[in-house]
Amino acid sequence: ACPTATPRGNVPMLPMALDALCDVMEARVESNRLEKERAAVLSEMTMVNTIEYRVECQILSTLHRENRLAKRFPIGKECLIRSWSTDDVKSWHRTHYRPDNVLLYIVGDVDPAEAERVVADKFGHITAEKQGSQIKLPEIKAEAARLADAVVGGTVKQGQSWHYPPVRHDWCVPKGVEVDPRIKLDGKEIDYDIHLQNPYPLDEKVDFLSTDEISSGKKIRPHIFRHELLQAFSLHLFAKRPVETIVDMPSFKRSLARRIALAALQIRLNVGGRSDDPAFTFVEFNQLDSAREGCAVCSLDLTAEPARWHDAVCKSLSEIRKLGVHGVTPGEMERYAGSLMTDAEQLAAQGDRISHGDQLAYLMETVANGHTFMSPEQSYAMTARALSTLTLEEVNAAAAELCSHVTGFKEAAEGAEGVVVAVACTPKTDDGSGPAYVDEESLTKCIYEACQAEVEPEEDVTVPHTLVPDDVLQEALAAN
């Protein structure tokens, strides 16, 4: 980020900013620079090697066990970082940093025609052929060709968005919901192991997880991570769904309906967490579109005292099932729809004061997921229009879809199509039979039993718009 012009002289800074980006595209890989960067990455590796990072790695590797994201973490392998030569780094850079593989976003008070001219002037001499000619390792070119063929052979990158990683997913969707055939995990074989399912010498020494049937046709992938540095129990329950692009009024209304249902559930969970003897210390249920992972992840995250993990799981799943089966109340619908309207109004009021960084992040995420980009003012107008026709039935349909992977575990209910992922992190203990002990079998059994209990609809609570009646207020105003 930089000013549009220099403080002294008022010289446009766009050409200078693009010069810096051009240096990145044409990076010179020199031995002394490589050693400095190697030392910096190794130092960073020691700083992020925390228990939180290890938990995150366990969660991601379980959630994405069917694709390459389970083995690709930001820092990488220490032995590889120490061994890379200048030719290795330069070949990797020239393979990936090509004009046809780059997206350039410019946000600011600049003239589009002038920006286009400057971009052509600064980057016009860089071509894919020029970058490819500098690859010193000849076997890379053949490998890159095989990788490119595999990318278009059944990944979300090819089937849904070129911004997504080249992965496939075990989708978990309600019965009857059709998944685009281009992104289905249909078991077809390809010659190239793009999803890294085969064993490799540098793989972590972990057991491959099994997918169990919690009952007929209802699948779950459980995993337990134990460590002596963990002080509390945590559960992470996931369902992966295709990203629904928001490009018209019906899709925008569905997104608002999901937000209302999620807000209602979160308040219910928070109320349960504020009781005199709460089962959990933290709980959150959400669904977010992730361009970095190429899917929408519906997640339940909770923490609890280790000895109370069973109670925490049962109570949180009960609330989710209550929402999925009975939906939201008319009072909740009114309150949270009003809250969405207030949020949109506040964002529109400060639309011209949003930082370029925030605007850029929003633009990139929106484009990557295939949504239609809207200014705060446009978003406010569309929200008002959508909420004016949104019905309670539409919100309850969204709630049922959000919670389908949990409600489907009930014996008489239709299970969701696909796999539910359950990751529990717990302190390591020598007592294999105490109340704090949990393994894959007991976790699966707890989830199944929690989903068999009957749930009653939420009692509607009428919240007055004001605590002072209008006649009393008018009388007080007249008296003063």
Image (spheres, rainbow, N blue to C red):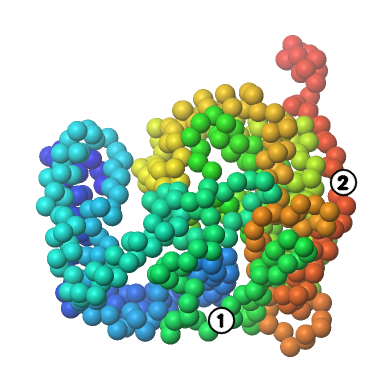
Q: CA distance from mark 1 to mark 2?
A: 42 Å
Horizontal and vertical percent for residue 235? 68, 66
Mark 2: which amino acid?
Glu
Q: Nearer the viewer, mark 1 or mark 2?
A: 1
Judge by depth and name the residue closer to the eye, 227 or 472.
Answer: 227
Percent x, y of residue 70: 50, 70
Which of these two is toward me, 385 or 419?
419
Above-or-below relation of 223 to 99: below
In terms of sequence position, does the residue under pointer 1 or pointer 2 come before the other? 1
Question: Going 42% across and 54% down the picture, which residue do you hit?
Answer: 157
Q: In this image, 182 relative to 456: left or right?
A: left
Q: Which residue bears the numbered disc 1?
A: 206
Residue drawn 48% across the image and 34% down it: 247
Disc on res. 456: 2
User: CB of mark 1 within 8 Å of CB of mark 2?
Assistant: no
- Residue 74 shows in the view: no
